[in-house]
Image (cartoon, rainbow, N blue to C red):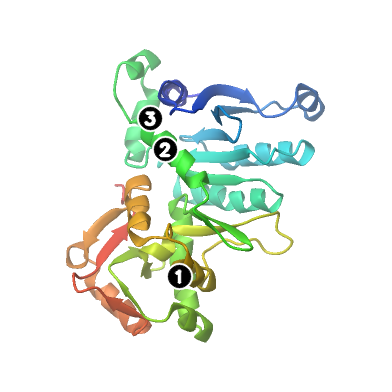
Amino acid sequence: MGNLARLLQQRFREAAPAGWSSTAEQRIMSADLERQLGFAPRADVLLARTDGSQRIWIEFEISRADPVANHAKFAAAHLFEPRAATDVFVSMVSSHVVYGRSNLAASAVYLMRAVGMSAFQTSLLPTHSPQHIAALNQKPFDELLNGHHFDPGQEIERAIAITRTMAVDPHHRIHFAANLFEVMVNVNAWNDAIGTPAGRAAWGQRTVTYFVHDPRSGLFAPSKYCAFVPVQEAAATSRPVIAMDMETYASLDESESRFDGNVARRHLSGRLAMQEVRLEASGLGDAFRRWLKGVEPAVRLHPRGPVVMRAIEWD
């Protein structure tokens, strides 16, 4: 284990919020199963409500070459010793884990859900560059202890927030999008849906100020749509849900007060460190206007003008 992970374990313990405890290196399988399977994984941190209503098993992925390994260990343990309904797996992944491997791990969360687990992946220290993460991880532990490198309360709050159910419908629990991979999947899902008659009918015409930009596809989408994801209530019997859909969005928009645009924007900027930039200052003006022509009149711009939300681009 690297020194940054050790520091995170200590800071989580010190900063555990009221009503929660935080302990490190917790066994996820019984000793008998460990002997049977021949491996003995431990959770980096176990955040547990003191009333017993929830346990969040957290893995820190700081610079790991194979971040999916911990997802697989937890899923394998679940197959032999199913987790309690109060148990949640959360992988927290830093920017030092390369893009493709981070996204592969985020995709593995859907597989964990398909076997009946409550599982999420979110950002770890999202305002820290890969170079800064690597430098912290290489510092002597005593030197790390004497510095103020991050706010552990923010890291804990993010882990708890993405596991919280924001709304429900007959088939799903609605959560915040837990990572940028899910946000960008939603960008593309919105664009696919708005290109269909059913999607346009469900969306109608809406006035929008904040738009998420996906640099890989070049597409934009309303930020509120991108900030929430549906999670199936039980193990999937068919293809698992991987993105917000227009029908669910429209239904929640009419019936659920917590499904709020300002809450969505604050989540994307505050927890996932997305940057808010006025359109003309973003350098994306021409690309945005070309995109907008393809989705009008479904999207109307707010008189204040559009704001682009985008991920930090590290050097």
Answer left or right for 181 relative to 135.
Answer: right
- In the image, 276 versus 170, the foreground residue is 170
* In this rendering, position of residue 58 left or right of residue 11: right
- Percent position of residue 294, x then y: 36, 83
Marks 3, 1: nearer the viewer: 1
Measure the alpha-carbon separation of dots 3 and 1: 36 Å
Q: Kindly identify the amino acid type of the residue bearing the numbered disc 1.
A: Glu
The circle on residue 254 is: 1
The disc placed on residue 288 is none
Out of 208 and 40, give the one closest to the viewer: 208
Q: Mark 1 or mark 2, which has the lower sequence index? A: 2
Residue at image mark 3: 152
- Element at badge 3? helix
Residue 59, image quadrant: top right
Which numbered tag is attached to residue 157?
Answer: 2
Answer above or below: position of 271 versus 264: above
Q: Residue at x 34, y 84 (%)?
A: 296
- The amino acid beneath tag 3 is Pro
Pointers 3 and 1 in contact (CB under 8 A)?
no
Kind of residue at disc 2? Glu
Is residue 216 visible in the rendered image? The answer is no
Residue 183, horizontal then vertical, whole percent: 44, 58
**Of all residues shown, which one is farthest toward the top?**
142
